Amino acid sequence: MSNGSSEYALQMVHIEKYFGLVCALKDINIQVGRNEIVGLIGDNGAGKSTFVKILTGVHRPTSGELYVAGRKVDLRTYSVRRAHGYGIETVYQDKSLGEKQVLWRNFFIGRQITLPFGFINVKKEKAVAQEIMMNTIGFRGRGITVDSKVNKLSGGERQGVAIGRAMHFEAELIVLDEPTVALSLKEVNKVINFVHKIKEGGKACVYISHSIADVYEVSDRFIIMDRGEIVGDIKKEDTSLKDLDAFLLEYSHGLRDQKE
Amino acid sequence: MTQLRTLIRFLSRIEGLAVAGVLALLYVVFITTSPEVFLKPRIYTSFMQTISPQLILALGLTFVITAGEIDLSFPAVVALAGFVFVWSYQNFDMWWGPWAGLALAMLVGAGVGYINGVLVAIIGVPSIMATLAAQFFWYGVTVLVADGKSIALTGIREEPIYDLFVGRIHGILPDQRGVPVGIPTQAVWALGLTILLWLILNRHKFGEAVMFIGDNANVARVMGINVEATKIRLFMMMGVIAAFAGVLLTLDINVFFPTQGEGYLLPVMAAVFIGGTSFAGGVGIIVGTFFGAYIIGSLEAGVVASGISGYWVQLVKGIVMGASVVINILIGQGRMAAFNERMRHWGLPIGGPSIAAPPPTDSPT
Ligand SMILES: Nc1ncnc2c1ncn2[C@@H]1O[C@H](COP(=O)(O)OP(=O)(O)O)[C@@H](O)[C@H]1O
Ligand SMILES: [Mg+2]
């Protein structure tokens, strides 16, 4: 399962991550299909964000292997930049935008359009940012321009920017780490629509949440994490929202521990 | 009324304009109180001469503060760099001696900055502690290697390096009673550095990385910025800039003394804050720093020339700095509307122009 095949957008094999003595991830094995939406569910502290950060090149795992589109990733040189190169985009709950920075900078931070000597092509970046805002995100009115600062935007608008950025860079795999935490119901629907679009576009997505209700509708498969381990990997057709809820409840009450 | 409002909104977007206004106002006051001094060019060339090293330091410090860090060790680098320069000038008795001195001084500055950067970015020591320790340490090193003594740079005025960095440019300002008044070259260097560093902060990948790191280092990291490497480079840049300022100072006064740069810490920090750069990080205002350095550097001579007792100098500095910082916060961050609102609430209808108030944000946390 670990070599050459390209039916998976992502494979993780025996991934482990320690922060000092704290084991945040233990023997993680995950596959995500090329056009699959995977809902990753788990309580706070389960290790979901750590998983995301390994996948996106922010953290280096203590051990294990990572394959993107069937190709083995050299983890010693893996980085956010390289993950972007592989077409992996991430939308974080709240930490993907610089609050005091103007919008156009936020679209291109980490992969600027440059002139010689590392100077930024401001004109071009602004033009593309403008285009993303109009066409991809559909911002109108309210006096928000590419020169507006992020701290003038509402939570939903911010998430729109982060999502628009991910869409613009034509990701193969989009990771959403609790993208709806700060959003109103209407704004949550926008995020859900976005995930539907990923599916229609033939791309893959890992949608992370601590609540099953959020991810149930859009996901093809559910992976349940608890204290750094995968404790469930269930296809949507094999379960119902009710069963899944019951399954999760067992973990949050520690019932599984007692049975062991 | 709406036109005025639009005008003010437009003006408030121009970087450093408010601070430039404060400086202009200050000079108007000086000209009114002592026209015999402030209507002649000599006082201004004297400002350009004395303020330039401080301005150069303040430009570097603006970057450091924008990144949400601080560097308290630059006064020691000013001294150490001066020593390295003088040492090289005296020991390499060749035409290239002073040039090698400049290069060595900047190398030493980079080295001090590198150590600061590693302490802060890799080991995780808060920069205020790391650079405070560095300030004591490198100042101590300078005193030791210089044996606590001043060293005169005899013959330096004949070297081309002197003309290049601290000479005078004649023929621009009018003569005063037949005596030519030249513009100090260091002021041109400082202006050039202001432009270069503005470009690097606002138009270069490095500057953007600095702003995002000061804004939120976690965001910077997940967006692919190498936070550690950027911070190390930042402190190295500050070290090189401080060394350059140190060499300028040594050249200008023709003598190295181990305590040189010691009095710069507070005025340089004041220049950055008067300029509107926020201590919170994320935003750096180079143009503001430029005018801020001129404000803080002009006060002393201005107050004394105005015939006010020298005892008032510090107090006036405090007032000007306080007023500038308040103006920056009100105008620069669009709080004017909220401020007017509050005034009206208290029954003080000042009815000033309102500048785009921040809309209520449901901030995600
Ligand atoms: N940078 C870090 N340093 C040390 N411990 C960390 C770090 N990041 C996460 N952890 C720990 O790893 C565990 C999993 O955290 P996280 O992945 O953020 O969980 P989740 O996103 O599922 O809420 C927690 O116990 C957390 O304290
Ligand atoms: Mg998390």
Image: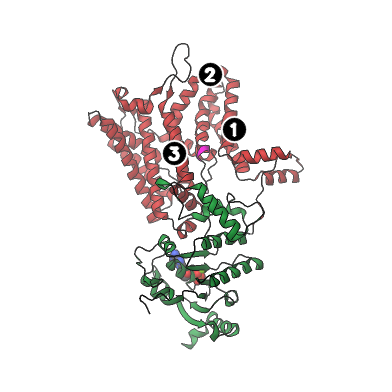
Chain colours: A green, B red
Residue B21 tag number? 1
Examine the rendered structure and indicate whether residue A71 appears above or below residue B62. Answer: below
Examine the rendered structure and indicate whether residue B158 appears above or below residue B2. Answer: above
Confirm whether circles 1 and 3 share one chain: yes
**How many marks are shown on the rendered structure?**
3
Please name which of the two marks, 2 or 1, marks the residue nearer to the observer: 1
Residue B264 appears in the picture as rendered: no
Q: Name the residue nearer the viewer: A50 or B143.
A: A50
Please name which of the two marks, 1 or 3, marks the residue nearer to the observer: 3
Tag 2 residue = B37
Tag 3 residue = B196
Q: Subunit of mark 3?
A: B
Which residue is outermost to the top? B177
Which residue is outermost to the bottom? A259
Horizontal and vertical percent position of residue B223: 47, 58
Considering the numbered disc 3 on the image, is that residue within a helix, a strand or a loop?
helix
Horizontal and vertical percent position of residue B212: 49, 52
Please identify the quadrant where the C terminus of chain B is shown.
bottom right
Examine the rendered structure and indicate whether residue A163 appears above or below residue B66. Answer: below
Residue drawn where x is 38% and y is 64% of the image: A78
Q: Which amino acid does label 2 sit on?
A: Val
Q: Which amino acid does label 1 sit on?
A: Gly
Query: What is the span of residues highlighted in magenta in the rendered image?
Result: B279-287
Horizontal and vertical percent position of residue A217: 59, 77
